[in-house]
Amino acid sequence: MKEVKRVAVIPGDGTGPEVIGEGLKVIKAVLPSCSCDIEFKHFDFGGERYMRTGETLPEGAIEELKTFDAIYLGAIGHPDIKPGILEKGILLKLRFELDQYINLRPVRLFPGVETPLKGKGPEDIDYTVVRENSGDVYTGMGGAMMVGTPDEVATQVMAYSRKQVDRCLRYAFEYARKYGKAARGKADKSKLALVGKSNVLTYVFDMWNRAFAEIGEEYPDIKREYYHVDATTLYQVASPEMFDVVVTTNLFGDIITDLAAITQGGLGVAAGGNLNPEGVSMFEPIGGTAPMWTGQNKINPLAAIWSGAMLLQSLGEEKAGDAIVEAIGDTTPKMKSMAAGQMGYSTTEVGDLVAQSALKRLS
Ligand code: IPM
Ligand code: MN
């Protein structure tokens, strides 16, 4: 008998259920090759539920989710709900309550995928962003006074504890050691680049830089680099091949991973994982709910499928997870475009192609 792992599925709103459906299809297809079995339990959290019940996450939801081995999330959002309510009430709440302190966002241009970067190919666009996921302006520290008057003041603080910094950096160094370009035979030495703004945010990045140097001493096999975030965006466009593993703060990571996403073919192919390496992690495509494409079987499911592969990897099923990632690379050359409605295939057909290819790779 195989060990049974439990995965909570939150398909969410808009095209979330369609892309998660394809991700589940692919995961289920490779399950016979896994050393565990997976039991899935679906939850209806999201904008639709909020409109119906006025509740973002019901009582006990967090406690229940803590009992799972992983969470698979589609997308949360609703055009009729004020920005911030669902984000803070569901997505960020889950990230914080489950202390998912790493947001791992791989950036990889699959074969045949069009990139807006002239002259760049799959060998150039191949890096990973380790986005700190628990601190920064996302903590909500700050406030407002005299709102609505000419003297109104508003603050939102970039807050970091040394503990948060250390655990994030440690994860990034370990990741670079295990999956950096040297580990994959693509460089002599793997690199970890810290991205910050030490010329202006002097307190915060003084702490990050000191921790980076101190912890880095334990990783002589990893080359350390530092870049300001503004310069980073320029390099991501002009010379993405210089990056290997990048570690950065929460808000900067949010911004540079959207830029990274378009260089790898757009949000349809950008995957991510909110990780608590000691707890429950949650995997989600970076793209949103895409309301205009809902229910048409035209949205690109690859980001969700890739996130599903990351979920399997996190459960220790590296072989099956890797096979799915490579199967995505088998599928992209057959597709006309990564854009919704222009793929040359339907959502479900793309899911079928990846599933078939993953199975072939595992057989
Ligand atoms: C992301 C999103 C979220 C973030 C929003 C929806 C709160 O942009 O996952 O990148 O800012 O982290
Ligand atoms: Mn974002």
Image: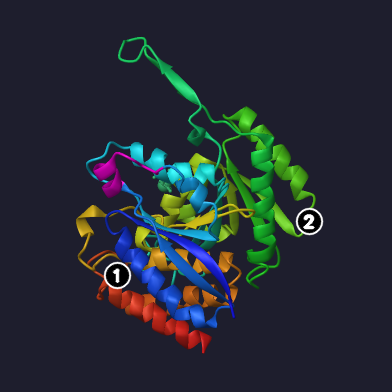
Q: Is residue 58 left or right of residue 64?
A: left
**In the displayed image of the protein, which residue is found farthest to the bottom?**
363
Which residue corresponds to mark 1? 337
Residue drawn at x 21%, y 63% is 295
Task: Report x, y in % for residue 92.
Answer: 45, 42
Q: Which mark is residue 194?
A: none
Of residue 57 and residue 262, the one placed in the foreground of this image is 57
Residue drawn at x 52%, y 70% is 123
> For residue 286, which quarter of the picture?
bottom left
Amino acid on which the number 1 mark rests in the picture: Ser
Q: Earlier in the sequence, mark 2 or mark 1?
A: 2
Q: Secondary structure at mark 2?
A: loop
Residue 230 in view (yes/no): no
Q: Which mark is residue 220?
A: 2
Q: In this picture, which residue range is highlighted in magenta? A: 47-58
Of residue 47 and residue 301, the one placed in the foreground of this image is 47
Q: Secondary structure at mark 1?
A: loop
Residue drawn at x 41%, y 51% is 258
Q: How many neighbours does mark 2 have within 10 angstroms: few (below 14), some (14-19), or many (20 or more)?
A: few
Of residue 228 and residue 129, the one placed in the foreground of this image is 129
Q: How many neighbours does mark 1 have within 10 angstroms: few (below 14), some (14-19), or many (20 or more)?
A: some
Task: Report x, y in % for residue 261.
Answer: 41, 56
Amino acid on which the number 2 mark rests in the picture: Pro
Residue 173 in view (yes/no): yes
Q: Is residue 24 above or below residue 150?
A: below
